[in-house]
Image (tube, rainbow, N blue to C red):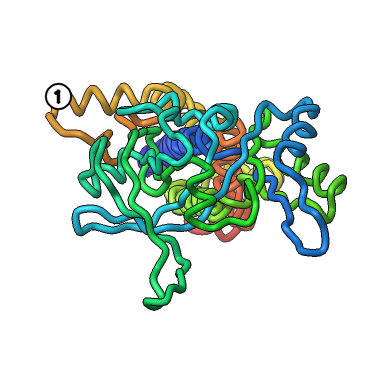
């Protein structure tokens, strides 16, 4: 029973460290892929009838003087429906200036077909993601139809606003963005949406993505009425909150393995106390105090926990570091594929070890085993020597 409990502690520590490291790797991979395409902040210009709106070129000049800003690009964004070959799907329509968009996005570096610079004003060309191209079975030169959720009123009636665009390029960044993002020239987006201004605002890239909130606070304070600022934490809040919740739930479930092992320690110590009642009584008659008896059984449970934590951590750290190579090796031997790169955008399991997770897991294990050892150790101190030895 001691060995099974010890193995349970080792397996619990190994499982928690490896699984949390893999989840950290997926989180980092997803975040890095998204942040290469999605700007760190959106600075929108307020367009009100009571005041003259700021020009995007003026705003661009102001942002260029801020040290933390690496680049900015004008944009017009909206929802649209993309249809081709009797297939249709909802997308996010991005009107951009290609020469500026390179400052905030790496789409131009991930073109599978065509060129991002092929987007010219009045050409009504579109650059779409690989996922959309595969879903619609569209290729370079195909004419696809973009429909926006607005209507045009004509003498013949009310019609949805739509326009045919030629596919000029296909990009692949390896994320969900390949399935729902399309790019057109900003002037074409302005005509299609009949936008009242040259641009909706500027998309901004910062030298540090996690300083976006501070940047937003600074810009809002300096232009309280002229600008509206959103950060990538706000636009993708639900996604990263879901990832955090999933990690918490998985950690809780795997911690149950350690909990079971700790519960077994209660059984082990209780049985040991039952079998060693006479020995405990002899120690008491020889002068052993209840405190010393308590420490004997506590040290037994805690030594099992410390040894399990040490061996579990020593096994888990190299396993978590090389988990991608380990899985790839078994994929080759068994002829199976755990992650299809065309579906999950990765061909190898990512892993990222966070030392705070390792420390937390070991502290949790020690605490659970300590709590599990207290009750049976306390019961050992309640053994009465006279009662225990009366039949000896």
List x then y, in percent, for residue 375: 59, 56
226 left or right, relative to 229: right
Q: Position of residue 43 (x, y in %)?
A: 69, 45
Question: At x 56% / y 31%, what residue is drawn?
Answer: 354
> Residue 23, located in which quarter of the rendered image?
top left
Identity of the residue furthest to the front in this view: 155
Q: Tell whether 313 sits left or right of 357.
A: left
Q: For residue 75, say whether it is visible.
A: yes
Residue 285 seen: no
**Residue 202 screen position, x and y as percent:** 66, 41
- Residue that numbered label 1 is attached to: 333
- Provide the secondary structure element on which disc 1 rests: helix
Along the viewing direction, whichever of 361 and 123 lies nearer the viewer: 123
In the displayed structure, would residue 287 be above or below residue 157?
above
Q: Position of residue 96 (x, y in %)?
A: 53, 39
Q: Residues within 10 Å of mark 1 (few under 14, many from 20)?
A: few
Question: In the image, what residue occupies the spot 51% across and 52% down?
Answer: 191
Up/down of 358 relative to 12, above or below: above
């Amino acid at each position: 029973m001691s060995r099974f409990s010890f193995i349970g502690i080792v397996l619990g520590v190994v499982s928690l460290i490896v699984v949390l490291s893999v989840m950290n790797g997926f989180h980092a991979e997803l975040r890095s892929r998204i942040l290469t395409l999605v700007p760190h902040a959106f600075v929108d210009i307020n367009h009100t009838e009571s005041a003259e709106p700021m020009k995007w070129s003026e705003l661009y000049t102001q942002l260029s003087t801020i040290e933390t800003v690496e680049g900015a690009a004008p944009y017009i964004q909206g929802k649209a429906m993309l249809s081709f070959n009797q297939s249709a799907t909802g997308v996010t329509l991005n009107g951009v200036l290609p020469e500026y968009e390179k400052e905030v996005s790496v789409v131009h570096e991930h073109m599978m077909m065509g060129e991002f610079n092929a987007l010219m004003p009045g050409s009504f060309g579109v650059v779409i993601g690989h996922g959309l191209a595969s879903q619609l079975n569209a290729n370079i030169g195909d004419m696809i139809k973009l429909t926006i959720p607005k209507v045009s009123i004509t003498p013949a009636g009310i019609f949805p606003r739509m326009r045919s665009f030629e596919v000029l390029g296909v990009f692949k960044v390896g994320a969900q963005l390949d399935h729902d993002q399309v790019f057109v020239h900003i002037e074409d987006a302005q005509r299609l949406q009949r936008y009242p201004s040259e641009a909706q605002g500027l998309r901004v890239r910062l030298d540090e993505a996690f300083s976006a909130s501070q940047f937003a606070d600074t810009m809002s304070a300096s232009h309280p009425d002229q600008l509206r600022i959103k950060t990538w934490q706000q636009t993708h809040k639900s996604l990263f909150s879901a990832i955090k919740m999933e990690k918490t739930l998985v950690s809780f479930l795997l911690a149950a393995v350690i909990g079971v092992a700790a519960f077994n320690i209660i059984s082990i110590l209780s049985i040991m106390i039952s079998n060693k009642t006479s020995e405990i009584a002899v120690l008491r008659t020889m002068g052993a105090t209840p405190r010393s008896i308590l420490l004997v059984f506590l040290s037994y449970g805690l030594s099992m926990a410390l040894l399990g934590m040490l061996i579990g951590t020593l096994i888990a750290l190299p396993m978590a570091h090389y988990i991608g190579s380990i899985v790839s090796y078994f994929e080759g031997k068994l002829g199976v594929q755990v992650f299809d790169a065309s579906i999950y955008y990765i061909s190898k399991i990512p892993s990222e070890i966070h030392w705070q997770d390792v420390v937390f897991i070991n502290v949790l294990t020690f605490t659970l085993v300590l709590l599990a050892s207290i009750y049976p150790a306390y019961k050992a101190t309640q053994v009465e020597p006279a009662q225990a030895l009366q039949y000896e």
